[in-house]
Amino acid sequence: MRLKTLLLSIVVGLVIGLAVVYVFRPPGLPLPRPPEAIQRLFSPSEEQLRTAFYKEHAGEKPLNWAIAEMADEMRESEPMGKFVLHKNDCSDFMEAVVDEGLGATARFKRESDKHILTRRSGLWSVFLWDRKSPLLPGDQVSVRHSPHYPPKAGSIGHCGLIGSDGNVRDWSKLRSWATDRYGSNSVEWFTRHSPGPTEVVITRLKPEYRYLAKPVPLPTG
């Protein structure tokens, strides 16, 4: 009998204690969480990273702008004909812009046949564009169907980058063209033949790198 009374007292005490914690906690304060949940709860959000960046780097632009401005520069300087391409396609231009913009040095300046930073998955967020979310300078835009001609059997995709003015910078050379072209067109035009919900893919520098919370891991040596 005494044992039952003791156990009952313990249970009642626990219930009362939990009720006190629940009722008398400050308004809006959540109930205690496991340590891993607390860690997730207080991990920096994109908004926190952005706020910290503009506080600590007043007057500067996030790092994605370096990609956008390099896309502008390479469109003007037209470097693609000055070296031997390993693929001779739009992605070669895009990857050269990313490497040069983020400080890895474009492959033709390194006299190499390789690109570096676009292959590092930890740097990038990849998502399907809903045609509503704003695109950022430096975003990589890949479309299922090239904007240069309507979709047909065997038609190819295309890619470019958002420049500093919001237009897409790209490089292309079709067999029917006498020379290559460095484009600067609206996003609407660039995606016009890829209207489906899965046909436009955006690759974006992750917030921790855009807002300089982490340095971009550049190659050494």
Image (spheres, rainbow, N blue to C red):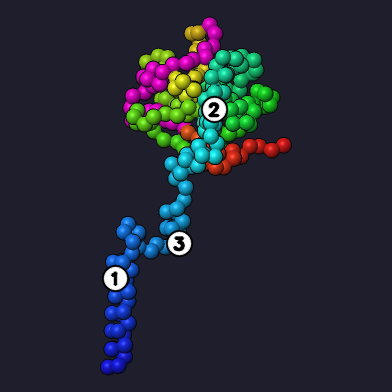
Q: Which residue is farthest top?
A: 178
Answer left or right for 144 relative to 88.
left
Point out the tag, 1 or 3, that comes first from the N-terminus. 1
Amino acid type at circle 1 is Ala
Q: Residue at x 66, y 37 (%)?
A: 219
In the figure, 208 relative to 128: above or below? below
In the figure, 130 relative to 169: above or below? below
39 or 98, nearer to the observer: 39
Write the start and end of the magenta stretch as one range: 178-203
Q: Which mark is residue 67?
A: 2
User: Element at badge 2?
Assistant: helix
Is residue 140 something one can see in this rendering?
Answer: no
22 or 6, nearer to the observer: 22
Identify the residue under disc 1.
Answer: 19
Check the picture and name the quadrant holding the C terminus.
Answer: top right
User: Element at badge 3?
Assistant: helix
Q: Which mark is residue 35?
A: 3
Point out the tag, 3 or 2, that comes first from the N-terminus. 3
209 or 178, nearer to the observer: 209
Q: Quadrant of residue 40?
A: bottom left
Of marks 2 and 1, the one in the foreground? 1
Q: Which mark is residue 1?
A: none
User: Element at badge 1?
Assistant: helix
Q: Residue at x 39, y 62 (%)?
A: 33
Amino acid type at circle 2 is Ile
Is 127 included in the stretch rendered in magenta? no
Measured as percent of width and height from the top left, residue 92 is found at: 56, 24
User: CB under 8 Å between callouts 1 and 3?
Assistant: no
Mark 2, Cα crowd under 10 Å, few <14 / some 14-19 / many 20+, is: many
Measured as percent of width and height from the top left, residue 134 is found at: 39, 29
Answer left or right for 118 relative to 166.
right
Mark 3, Cα crowd under 10 Å, few <14 / some 14-19 / many 20+, is: few
